[in-house]
Image (cartoon, rainbow, N blue to C red):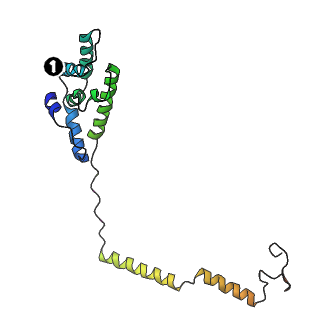
Amino acid sequence: MAQQLALLPQQAMTLSLEQRSSSAQRILASPIGPVEAARAAKRLVGSYAHMKPSDADTFVESVMAVLSGYPAGLVAECVDPRTGVARTLKFLSIAELVEWLDARQRHYQSFADWRPRPPALPPPTFTEEHKATMRQRLVDLFRRLATRADPIDEMKRAYRTSRAQGAPSRDQAPGGAPNLSPGPPS
């Protein structure tokens, strides 16, 4: 299984959310066996040509122990030099390997947990009686608005009326004399 997944070409980045979710579920679905984990550990350690651990067998066993705790699809991605940990880490350590695997597992788990939105509600259907009632209410509202006086016109009318009754304007002091003070009339 892991070898089959390792030979698959890289996924296109134009997958829909449904396709990504399905792919993530497949990657996370199958556990890796001890034989596959041992092969994957040897392949991963072999990707680091400069690596000369003092006890190579112990290091490979440690890597194998770490890889055996993850799904086969994730391990296959990890050991693939095109997409895996060797592409991002210059020096392999158990801590960095675990960090990389945990981050990728969270990534795939977030897609695997994705659920499509429920379908949209259908548009409401109204009875002819309801439509007629709403039309009549709108007609009544427009009539009230059309017959209502404009508030600015009402203010202008009130101003003209007060001027006609002899109320002083802003430019005149009480009694008809010109207002010479710099501030508002007193």
Q: Which residue is mark 1?
A: 35
Q: Range of the magenta residues?
A: 119-126
Where residue 87 sits, quadrant-wise, is top left
Residue 4 in picture, x, y percent from top left: 13, 31
> Residue at horizontal 27%, vertical 55%?
119
Q: Nearer the viewer, residue 18 or 94?
A: 94
The secondary structure that most of the magenta stretch takes on is: loop
> Residue at horizontal 17%, vertical 20%?
39
Q: Nearer the viewer, residue 33 or 154?
A: 33
Q: Nearer the viewer, residue 50 or 37?
A: 50
> Residue at horizontal 24%, vertical 42%?
21
Inspect the magenta stretch and tell me whether residue 85 lies in it: no
Residue 33 in picture, x, y percent from top left: 17, 22
Where residue 132 sits, quadrant-wise, is bottom left
- Point out the image quarter for the C terminus: bottom right
Residue 11 in picture, x, y percent from top left: 21, 40
Q: Report the amino acid beneath label 1.
A: Val
Residue 86 in picture, x, y percent from top left: 27, 26
Inspect the magenta stretch and tell me whether residue 125 lies in it: yes
Secondary structure of the residue carrying tag 1 is: helix
- Point out the image quarter for the N terminus: top left
